[in-house]
Amino acid sequence: MRRFDCLKALSGEAKDALVVSSAGATTLEWNALRPGDGNFRVRTLGLCSSIALGMALGLPQRKVIALDGDGSLLMNLCSLPTIARMNPTNLIHIVFDNQVYEASGCGETATAHGADLVAMARAAGIQHTLWAHSVESFAEAVSRALAGVPEIALTARLS
Amino acid sequence: MLSGFINQKRKDRLKVDAAARTILSGLKEAGINLIASLPDINLAELLRLIEQDRDVIHVPLCREEEGIGICAGAYLVGKKCTVVMQNGGFFNSNNAIVSTLLQYQIPLLLMIYYAGDIGDRTFSTSGGMTEPVLNAMGIRFYTLRELAQAKEVIQRAQVLAEDSKRPVALLLTKEVLGRRPAAGAI
C-alpha cells in the first residue's frame, strides 16, 4: 500500500476539511493533490496531532484531518490521551506508519520493532481506532469517519 | 496562638481564592476563550476555577509542549488562547515555541508560575534559568507581583502578543497568587 494512493482516495472525500500535515513528504504529496488555504504544514516534529486537536476544538462544525507519521506521533504520544479526554467529534487522526524517519535519512522508528500505534491509541482511550491494510479499507474508513464517526485514529501500515 | 494560626490560614485561603478569581476574569476580559494547562500546586485554585468556567474551553494537558500546538491550531481558527503552566513546563515547550509560534508568527499568552523565584526554597536552578531563556528566545515578559495590577497587565500582555504576533509571558509569583513565600519553612 502506497501513501500517495491513500492520499488520493482521501482527496476525493475530504471536501472542505482542514488538513494538518506532519513535516516531510506527506505535505508535498497532499498539497499536490488538494492545494489550498485549508492545509497547514507542521514544522515541529510531533505537533501535528496537537495542532489538529486545537483546530478541531476551536471550530467544532468543521472536519479536521491530521496527516501524521509514526515518527511524529511517537514523539508526542501524550497527545493521544489528551485527544481522548477532549473527545472532539470532528477530528480524524490518520497516521501513515512507514516505520522509518523518512525525512531524516530513513532510520527505523520504534514501530519497526513492535510498537503498535493503534493499540496505543486504544489504550489511551480513543474509542474508534483501526488499522487500514489496503487502500480500499483506508478509503472506506475515511468516508465513514467523514460521515460522522467521532474522534478516530486510523493508522495505515505502508510497504 | 492556635486561633491566630487558624485566622492566618483563613486569610491565606481568601487571598488565594481572590487571586484565582481576579486572574481568570482578567484572562476573560482580555478575550481568552481557550486555556490549556498543566498543574502546579500554586496554580491549583486557578485551574479549578478554569475547569468550572463555562465560557472557556479548558484543555488539561499531559505535557506542556502539546499545549503550544493546541493553542496554535486554535488560534489559526480564531480562538484566543493561553497556556497556564510552571516554568518547568515552559522549558518543556521550547521547541514548539520556536518552530511553531515564532516560525509562523503566532501570538500566545504564556502564564508561567515562577518556581524558584526569590524567597522560594525549591527550584532555584529553574528559577535562575527562566528569565535568561525567555530573553534568549526574544519573548517579552513581565513579572506579576501585585494582584491589583494583574487584570490590566494581562490585557496589555494580550494586546502586545497580538500586535507583535509573538508569544508574551507573564511570570506568576507566589505574591500575586496569594501564596506566601516559603521563607522560614523547612
Image (tube, coloured by chain):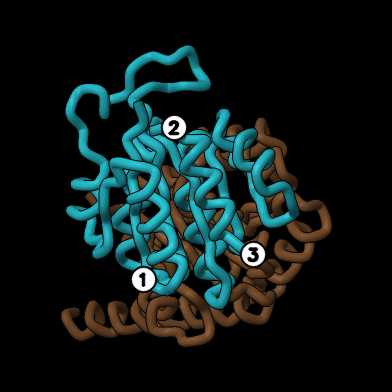
Chain colours: A cyan, B brown
In this rendering, would A115 be left or right of A18? Answer: left
Q: What residue is drawn where x is 45% and y is 63%?
A: A91
Question: What's under tag 3, amino acid-wise?
Answer: Asp
Q: Position of residue B186 (x, y in %)?
A: 22, 49
Q: Nearer the viewer, residue B76 or B62?
A: B76
CA separation, marks 2 and 1? 25 Å
Can residue B122 be seen in the rendering of this structure? no
The disc at residue A2 is 2
CA separation, marks 2 and 3? 24 Å
Can residue B175 be seen in the rendering of this structure? yes
Q: What residue is drawn where x is 78% and y is 65%?
A: B159
Question: What's under tag 2, amino acid-wise?
Answer: Arg
Looking at the rendered structure, whether the residues under marks 2 and 3 are on a common chain is answered as: yes
Q: Position of residue A80 (x, y in %)?
A: 32, 53
Which of the chains bears the disc numbered 1? A
Q: Which residue is mark 1?
A: A149
Which of the chains bears the disc numbered 3? A
Q: Position of residue B132 (x, y in %)?
A: 60, 33
Quadrant containing the N terminus of chain A is top left
Is residue B54 depicted above or below B106 in this figure?
Answer: below
